[in-house]
Image: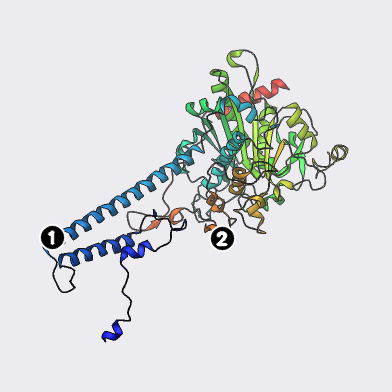
Amino acid sequence: MAAASSHILPLPSAAASRSKVPKSPLFPSSLPLSPSVHAQTSSSRHHSRIRASSGGKDASNTPPSSSAMKAITKDVEMEQQREDRRVEMAQAKDKEDARERERRWQESHQPRDNLAPRWREVAGRDNWVGMLDPFDPLLRAELIRYGEFAQACYDAFDFDPYSRYCGGCKYSRRSFFQSLDMANAGYEVTRYLYATSNVKLPNFSRRSKRNNAWSDSANWIGYIAVSDDATTVLLGRRDIVVCWRGTVTQLEFIADMVNFNQPIYAEGIPTPDRSVKVAAGFVNLYTDKDTNCRFSKYSARDQLLAEVRRQVLRYAEERGEEVSISITGHSLGGALATLSAYDLAEVGLNRVRPGGGEERVVPVTVYSFAGPRLGNEPFKERFEEILGLKSLRVVNVHDAVPKVPGLIINENVPEFVRRAGAAMPWSYCHVGVKLALDHKRSPFLKDTAEASCFHNLEAYLHLLDGHHGTERSFALTTGRDPALVNKACDFLKEEYMVPPNWRQDANRGMARNADGRWTQPERTKFDDYPADIEYYLNQIERAINNRA
């Protein structure tokens, strides 16, 4: 046995082993040890102390001396204290990171500090010349901000047919932005907008399967909000924003909306040019009403005109403030944004006389995302040249919706063809300025044939975040989370491990009541129309008649 043991090499000491480890930038000596390594190192120290206390003899069966035990206990306590401090520091950093993420998220809803002196430029005073390529960072921030106002319409809409509130808004007007984690938006919602569930538009409306539904013939379609005093200072003016809901995945609404166009005056929208036409489905949704319904006894148009008149009168005429009207929407909402901007200007709601003095024009700007075409060539001319309205259209070049209607006669064909075909029911032209994006330039998005992904509003906002110009690389700028893309679709690459369609209400809105049964709780009562709506509508009617 002695001879055999002479061939066994003695184990090197810990110090000797460490001295033989080559230094390498891949294994820097300054790297912190893991808790398990710390424990092993501490254990080695403890055994060393025990061996030292026993004179270097085998101490496996020898109890350590009291001095060694005290040293071991002290080492263990110090190691535990160090570990506790490491945990506390890690937790503090996690909290600080969470606060920073929340701060950046809330700041994303606020206008930039340098917006006030440039707001007219950003709102299209010069038709965004020199701001699109390369892409102006201030314009990017504002487009994302208004896009999130439009996205709020989707996040707040109740799509669940098993909910008695299907087709309505999930949140009360007074807590709207707080409920959507947008408490720092800096706007107050002053009015919800409703439209009748028109039987001619089956792919747009949502209805509850329940017998006690909140409404049998109305759908929530958007809201109007006004900037608060602090945000008004940042904006450089009081901003009245109108947000229209569109469609999420049901792209079939296009077939319902654009079968033919019709004269706009036939739907009660005043215009001196009788050749102006718009898609019948859009204008019907905007002007139809149901006098037997509490929520749609006034058309969406009536609701909009009365509320905008009330706010313009309050801030522009009575207080003499600088005011802007910003209208935004996605998909169908983009078309309604364009139509309502035209209507406001034709009616003259953007013309004010502060204190009865000189007339002043309130700027009206449309921020449209993935919107289809709306009207014909005369509509385009009157919108841009005579009424002086501004529209910035954000489109994904692979999205089919902005390419319809008007596949034959549109703004891209020669002018003489457009004029010759202006009277045709399939003649359509986009208005305003186009900002073209391409989802294939984003390294976050996967190849897919799913058309609804190309059309998704969160995907559009992601593209805006990374777009810098046609000849510049895609690079995210604002810190906006790419995971938002998959909120209501499946567009992110698998490697990011973000589940598709992840945004859901807890328990599908069900809650346990006092009896232990799961039910859908009552929601805050929907607002009735303000008592002064007829007053403002009569004012508008008189103004139209006087101008005629």
Q: Which mark is residue 494?
A: 2
Q: Residue furthest left?
A: 66
Given the image, on which type of amino acid does mark 1 rest? Answer: Ser
Q: Quadrant of residue 102?
A: top left
Q: How is the image coloured?
A: rainbow
Q: Give the SS element for disc 2.
A: helix
User: Considering the image in quadrants, where does the C terminus appear?
Assistant: top right
* Alpha carbons under labels 2 and 1: distance apart: 59 Å
In the rendered structure, the answer to whether residue 525 lies left or right of residue 270 reads left
| Label 2, residues with CA under 10 Å away: few <14, some 14-19, many ≥20 | few
Q: Position of residue 232 (x, y in %)?
A: 52, 26
User: Considering the image in quadrants, where does the N terminus appear?
Assistant: bottom left
| Label 1, residues with CA under 10 Å away: few <14, some 14-19, many ≥20 | few
Please state which of residues 21 and 237 is positioned toward the viewer in this rendering: 21
Q: Quadrant of residue 269?
A: top right
Given the image, on which type of amino acid does mark 2 rest? Answer: Glu
Q: Residue at x 18, y 71 (%)?
A: 57
- Asked if residue 59 is positioned above or below residue 280 in the image, the reply reads below
Q: Give the SS element for disc 1.
A: helix
- Please indicate, yes or no, whether residue 537 appears anywhere in the rendered image: no
Q: Which mark is residue 419?
A: none
Q: Position of residue 458 (x, y in %)?
A: 58, 48
Residue at the spot of label 1: 67
Q: Residue furthest top?
A: 357
